[in-house]
Amino acid sequence: MRHTILKSAALVAAIASLAGSAGASEALAPAAPAPPAPADPHAHAAQPAGAADTAQVATLGVLRRARQTSDAVPDAVRSHIAQAMGPDVGANPDLARRALRTSLGEDLYVVPGRGWVCLASSGGAAGCTPTDQIDQGYAVTLQRIPSGVRLGGLVPDGVSTVTIRGGAGETATATAEGNAWRADVAFDPASVAWTRAGDRAEVSVPVSVPPPEPTADAG
């Protein structure tokens, strides 16, 4: 399987500016105090998080429920998390919750880390965002696919629909489930937006994807 690491919108923005337990019957482990998110996930080595912290549990309802059998992360995804994210962000697949299964059979897992939360896919892609930036809308990943662009991300409790807008006025929507969402669009996205239940203000962040790779000259 080809594994791809997708930078979250939070990491892309930063780069641009400078540039419990596996059983369903067991209770959810107590939340750990929220550590400060490191400015750079690769600036230090950290042990895997022992529990979702208080900020993660408060933001993401999917982490407040007890783990179930379906939350078990497959070995291939577990290996990808270990290799791609390693100990740097403290992502711990033993704390993961399966957020949703897409129409294409892809499973998305919400994986707590040490001050970070990652969204890992059974398709081999993942992105991580500092916990405190999920509320700000920056937990977005983008990937070019043959049909256009594949997007996904994390949203806080109270968000049910995510809107993707293109620079030429195109729009598409995705349904959030388990604090996660996924969408494939045939245009280049310019922004991702959502409104939390009970709020009037829309949260909107700009996004961009790399230009398509040039096609080899057949001649």
Image (cartoon, rainbow, N blue to C red):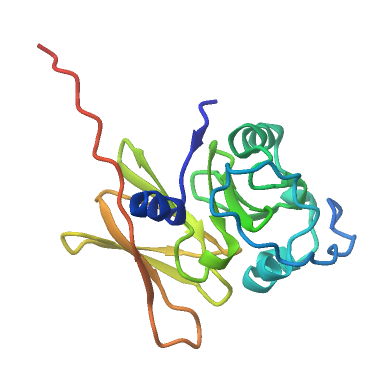
- Residue 216 percent across, percent down from the top left: 19, 19
Instruction: Identify which residue is drawn at 55% across, 77% down.
Output: 158
- Residue nearest the viewer, comparing 17 with 33: 17
Residue drawn at x 31%, y 35% as measured from the top left: 146
Q: Is residue 92 above or below residue 123?
A: below
Residue at the farthest right position = 26
Left or right of 176 in this view: 26: right
Q: Place residue 88 in its image quadrant.
A: top right
Q: Residue furthest left?
A: 219
Q: In this rendering, is residue 201 above or below 70?
A: below
Position in image of residue 4 (x %, y %): 49, 34
Residue situated in front as seen by the camera: 120 or 72: 120
**Residue 99: percent from left, percent from top:** 62, 57
Count the labels in the image: 0
The residue drawn where x is 64% and y is 68% is 60
Q: Residue 55 at what x, y percent from top left?
A: 67, 70
Q: Quadrant of the N terminus?
A: top right
Vertical side of 4 occupied by 25: above or below: below
Work out which quarter of the rendered image holds the C terminus and state it.
Answer: top left
